[in-house]
Amino acid sequence: MKCWRGWANANNLNRNLPMTPIHHIRPTDSDYSTRLVAPLRLINLIWPLPEPRDIEKWRLRGTHHFVIYSEAEPLAHAGIFVREVFTARGTIPVGALGGVCVHPDYRGRGWGRDVAQAAFDFLPQLGVEVSLFQTPVPDFYARLGARLVSNRFHNGSNPADPFMDVYKMILPASFDWPEGDIDINGPGY
């Protein structure tokens, strides 16, 4: 199994938690689809959908997944892929963060922070400087160095906001983010 940057909770030793590896599932892995079956169960537990999610769509858009397991059961997940968004300043490639979740029975251990941070730490390998994402918990991400943005977001000529959550954020907070409308060039994530 491939692990990302060692172990979760490495900076949080005072919580008396076991050191937990963060596994990196790459879209180029030959067993990508097989390895995503279990994390998909966790995502569906947190955000159930009437139709099944398509693992092949994740592979095609190059989604990297960061997962904490207990034995074979996923307990925390974050995914990130590159999306080019259109702004008044031109096209900006962003790290599209999504699917950050922790199994309800295992919350409060810092694992959501750990998988989200692993995804953010991977931005340079994706060739992007900034992550753009939606969230219902902005304070959580502010502690990781993100900030709220107040642009109007749309997808192409559809004026409706493609994001489900009210709060949109970028990381790092210091990134020179443009004002004005942002076309996220695809569905919300």
Image: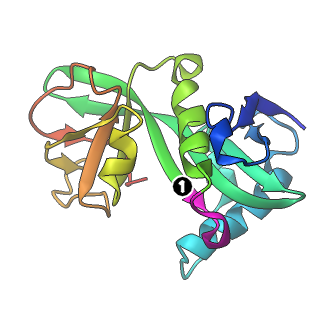
Q: Quadrant of residue 188?
A: bottom left
Query: For numbered disc 1, what is the local secondary structure?
Result: strand
Q: Name the side, left or right, on which 179 lies relative to 34.
A: left
* Residue found farthest to the bottom: 50
Q: Is residue 155 visible?
A: no
Tell whether 178 sits left or right of 3: left
Is residue 87 at least partly visible in the picture? yes
Residue 51 at x, y percent in the picture: 58, 78
Q: Residue at left 35%, top 26%?
A: 172
Residue 126 x/y as whole percent: 55, 22
Q: How is the image coloured?
A: rainbow
Nearest the camera: 7 or 134? Answer: 7
Q: Residue at x 59, y 63 (%)?
A: 107
> Magenta includes 54?
no
Residue 170, relative to residue 47: is it above or below? above
Residue depicted at 52% across the width and 24% down the height = 123
Q: Where does the N terminus fall, quadrant-wise?
A: top right
User: Where on the picture, by quarter, is residue 54?
Assistant: bottom right
The magenta region covers: 101-108
Q: x%, y% of residue 58?
A: 62, 49
Question: Measured from the top left, where is residue 62 in percent x and y?
Answer: 62, 37
Please tell me how crowded label 1 is: few (under 14), some (14-19), or many (20+) other residues with Cα within 10 Å.
Answer: many
> Above or below — where is 128 with respect to 36?
above
Q: How many marks?
A: 1
Q: Hey, which residue is sitting farthest left in the picture?
A: 180
> Dot 1 corresponds to which residue?
99
User: What residue sits 65% from the left and 47% below the top?
Assistant: 15
Callout 1, which amino acid?
Gly
Please say if 10 is above or below 162: above
Residue 25 horizontal side relative to residue 189, left or right: right
